[in-house]
């Protein structure tokens, strides 16, 4: 699985795709594989203020509940409503199935995140495969 | 998602290497490193409901009680009536503490005139064996721990009979649910073949020699023979969602050393007409007293999944109970749970809340089992 080079990544397995002052957020393919069949996502409402590194919602597979952590601070400007009725889309294509879009309050925070190559190395070490 | 810490004491079944080769995702469960899923929990769950699935349940323990007083010994330590068993018949039962709470639940098989096999849970193997040995000392019987002698494979689902008939070359229409016989399977003679399971479907369990080579060969031959019915290897993830839909108790969840038989709603497997068994006296008292709590089925009304250990609240937000098992139910496509609540909340249709990450999410009590297999798919009843 190739990890897009235009994304940045967290060690909690979220991706963020910056686009000027806004950014799109989802979870990585590694995350969906670890979780297994995803059956529920709990996402914030429009206008919610997110703090980088803090939980903004959760994703649940049949077996496990996992918190979602904001890769960067900002205000929620869009929520992917499709995922409420079709959370399995994340299993089918985690990098296309975005969860939220935010207006970045401090774009400089992105510099602290992993790039694709660093993330791939990180999961190779974490997963042992 | 921290990686699971595997302690050095974790045990593996003889099929461990086979599971890895087949790409299973492994987890630790009650001290065992077991497959949690292969193709995915939902696919495996649906496979068992509509076709057939194959599970490694070798982590289950086995205790043999034999000798002239084997029956009185089994009668003394279990709550169901073992005297009602014919040779070749099995029954769901439990070992109880004197307080009427659970040491474990189990299946009692009558192997011979004075010969019984108790199949017990993985996490309680040592505790159960010690309990059985210590509480049968006054009887003339032998107690043997056979837990490591068998690789136990469960073949479950509406197509399981066709698969096991093909494997054994015998007609199984006369083998009723909760009966067993000896059969030749995969070239092995005299294999214990029981029509039992933990999925709410028709199904069989076979007990083959525990050596790794034989176990791996049988596992692969079962799957190969089942290809025409779409047989798939299944993990503990699907085993859990299947048993939850069927409201089958799991030790440490619906039953434990603090829950008694009446609370758990297992009355029909507890034979109070038996003059004596460990726990009986306490249950006589408990029956006449008011129950503290009762096990109910919940279906979520609002969005959210109740999970094991979550608090149950009344509509006003007061804590009234707790969830013992909760999950998305793949066949029913609903979020369901089992929970202990005060008896007055037990009526069907009662609305309550489940606390999910600080929010009281609405649920209602519903009839259980949540799922019942279609009547025609098997003969007999447990």
Image: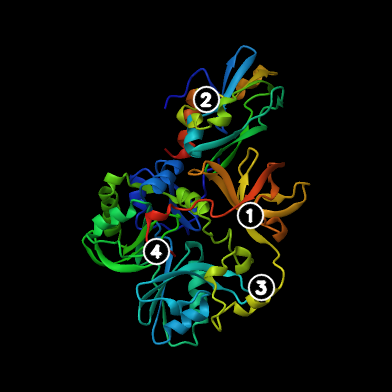
Label 4 crowd bin: few (<14), some (14–19), many (20+), radius 10 Å: few
Q: Nearer the viewer, residue B114 or B201?
A: B201
| Chain identity of mark 4 | B
Q: Which residue is mark 4?
A: B380
Most extreme residue toward the top is: A20
Quadrant hosting residue B171: bottom left
**Which of the two labelled residues, at mark 1 and mark 4, occupies the earlier sequence position?**
1
Point 53% across, 30% down: residue: A86
What is the CA distance from the residue labelled 1 to the residue labelled 3? 20 Å
What is the CA distance from the residue labelled 3 to the residue labelled 2? 54 Å
Label 1 crowd bin: few (<14), some (14–19), many (20+), radius 10 Å: many
Q: Nearer the viewer, residue B287 or B381?
A: B381
In the rendered image, residue B238, in percent from the top left (x then y), is placed at 46, 48
Quarter of the image that includes the C terminus of chain B = bottom left
Q: Residue B287 — which label?
A: 3
What is the CA distance from the residue labelled 1 to the residue labelled 4? 30 Å
Q: Which residue is mark 2?
A: A97
**Which of the two labelled residues, at mark 3 and mark 4, occupies the earlier sequence position?**
3
């Amino acid at each position: 699985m190739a990890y897009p080079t235009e994304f940045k990544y967290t060690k909690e397995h979220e991706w963020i795709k910056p686009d000027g002052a806004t950014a799109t957020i989802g979870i990585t393919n590694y995350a969906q594989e670890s979780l297994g069949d995803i059956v529920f996502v709990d996402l914030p409402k429009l206008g919610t203020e997110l703090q980088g590194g803090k939980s903004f919602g959760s994703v649940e597979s049949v077996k496990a509940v996992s918190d979602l952590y904001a890769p960067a601070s900002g205000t929620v400007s869009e929520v992917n409503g499709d995922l409420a009725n079709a959370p399995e889309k994340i299993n089918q294509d985690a990098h296309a199935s975005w969860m939220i879009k935010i207006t970045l309050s401090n774009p400089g925070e992105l510099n602290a995140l992993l790039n694709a190559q660093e993330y791939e190395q990180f999961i190779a070490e974490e997963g042992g495969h | 998602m921290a990686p699971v810490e595997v302690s050095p004491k974790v045990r593996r079944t003889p099929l461990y290497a086979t599971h890895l080769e087949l790409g299973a995702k492994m987890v630790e469960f009650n001290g065992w490193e077991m497959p949690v899923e292969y193709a995915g929990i939902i696919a495996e769950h649906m496979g068992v409901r509509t076709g057939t699935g194959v599970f490694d349940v070798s982590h289950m323990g086995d205790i043999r009680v034999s000798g002239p007083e084997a029956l009185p010994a089994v009668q003394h330590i279990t709550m169901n009536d073992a005297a009602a068993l014919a040779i070749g018949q099995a029954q769901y039962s439990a070992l109880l503490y004197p307080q009427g709470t659970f040491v474990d639940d189990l299946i009692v098989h009558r192997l011979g005139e004075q010969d019984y096999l108790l199949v017990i849970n993985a996490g309680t193997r040592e505790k159960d064996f010690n309990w059985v040995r210590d509480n049968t000392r006054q009887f003339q019987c032998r107690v043997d721990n056979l837990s490591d002698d068998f690789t136990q494979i469960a073949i479950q689902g509406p197509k399981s009979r066709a698969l096991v008939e093909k494997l054994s070359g015998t007609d199984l229409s006369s083998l009723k649910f909760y009966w067993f016989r000896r059969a030749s399977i995969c070239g092995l003679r005299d294999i214990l073949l029981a029509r039992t399971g933990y999925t709410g479907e028709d199904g069989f369990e076979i007990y083959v020699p525990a050596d790794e080579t034989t176990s791996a060969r049988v596992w692969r031959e079962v799957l190969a023979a089942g290809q025409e019915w779409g047989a798939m290897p299944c993990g503990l993830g699907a085993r859990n969602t299947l048993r939850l839909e069927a409201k089958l108790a799991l030790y440490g969840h619906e039953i434990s050393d603090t829950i008694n038989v009446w609370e758990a709603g297992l009355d029909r497997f507890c034979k109070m007409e038996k003059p004596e068994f460990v726990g009986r006296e306490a249950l006589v008292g408990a029956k006449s007293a008011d129950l503290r709590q009762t096990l109910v089925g919940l279906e979520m009304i609002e969005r959210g999944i109740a999970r094991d250990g979550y608090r149950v609240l009344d509509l006003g937000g007061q804590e009234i109970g707790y969830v013992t098992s909760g999950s998305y139910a793949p066949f029913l496509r609903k979020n369901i749970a089992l929970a202990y609540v005060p008896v007055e909340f037990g009526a069907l249709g009662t609305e309550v809340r489940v606390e999910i990450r600080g929010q009281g999410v609405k649920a209602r009590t519903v009839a259980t089992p949540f799922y019942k297999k279609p009547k025609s798919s098997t003969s007999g009843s447990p």
